[in-house]
Image: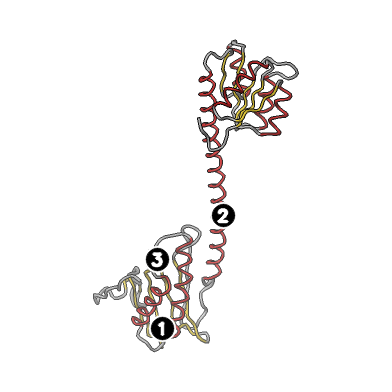
Amino acid sequence: MAHTRAISVLTIEDEPIIRQGISDYLEDCEYSVIQAENGRRGVELFRKHSPDVVLTDLRMPIMSGKEVLSCLSEESPETPIIVVSGVGDISDAIEAIHLGAWDYIIKPIQDMAILLHAIEKCVERATLIRENREYRENLENAKRVADRDMRMAVNVQKNYLPKKPPATPGWEVAFEFRPMAGVSGDFYDFYEKEGTLLGLSVFDVSGHGIASGLITMIAKSIVFRCFNGMRDIPLNTVMENINAELIAEIDNMDNYLTGALVRIDDGVVNYVNAAHPGMLARASSGKDVEIVGAAEGYLNGRFL
């Protein structure tokens, strides 16, 4: 059988004829074979060469196969170890499995294809275990990076939005901002000049997470620039200019925005809405809260 890289097999066997027979057969199958005549030598060669598979007898001088199993399983639990033993006692087989053996083959091996099949299955299983471990490690690392980026984005956005309402004569201002998931697609702003409140805005970017949070930062700058730079232009035209600049800046992003602008000029409140929930108001003379413009058939504009 052909391999892109010769799979290395360490065979630990104290009987030279059996050891050589296994080695010759596996080399004919294009495996790379390392031979060890006893357990101690096998452990030394394992540490030196890090083979893909280990074959070991149980009854050996100097260091038994059970000792080899115990040692190598602890050092390299992902390396398949197959016991090839003339001991057919079921208790030995069970103990070997408990010590870390992946399979158990009884000598003499009547058909070497049995050994080959066991090696192939163990290599396949070891590959899956390694790939799953690497996948988990990559996933955990990706999560750590994502969590770090999210924390950074949360801090950036938190410092980018107003922390306190403006203290301005004639207006009592309060707000509450609670992102649903760290970074929010919502943003708001207040516009002042020399202690006078000129207006405010509230917008919502579709979606959640870092992508929406980044768009809030772009959009907030555009809204700020347009609002303050177009004081003498009708507010609906200001919103149209905001939309044009958003299109130019974020281009083919899948996100859209809804939002509302409020301009305050000598006690007169101008209000324009782009598909955002309606602004609520209560007249000082009454107790009922109404959606601004509802009675006049006012219609919100489209989303941005």
Q: Is mark 1 on a helix, strand or loop?
A: strand
| Label 1 vs label 2, nearer the camera | 2
The answer to whether residue 288 is visible is no
Q: Are marks 3 and 2 in contact (CB under 8 Å)?
A: no
Assess disc 3: are there few (<14), some (14-19) or many (≥20) residues with their C-alpha within 10 Å of its C-alpha.
few
* In the displayed structure image, the side of residue 262 where residue 10 appears, left or right: right
Q: Mark 1 points at which residue?
A: 264
Q: Is mark 3 on a helix, strand or loop?
A: loop
Name the spot of residue 154 as percent of width and height, x first. 54, 62
Name the spot of residue 133 as percent of width and height, x first. 56, 40
Q: What residue type is labelled 1?
A: Ile
- Residue lying at the far right of the rendered structure: 62
Q: What residue type is labelled 2?
A: Val
* Structural distance between the alpha carbons of marks 3 and 2: 23 Å
- Identify the mark at residue 171; answer none if there is no mark: none
Q: Name the residue under label 3.
A: 253
| Label 1 vs label 3, nearer the camera | 3
Name the spot of residue 215 as percent of width and height, x first. 45, 68
Answer with mark 1 or mark 3, whichever residue precedes in sequence: 3
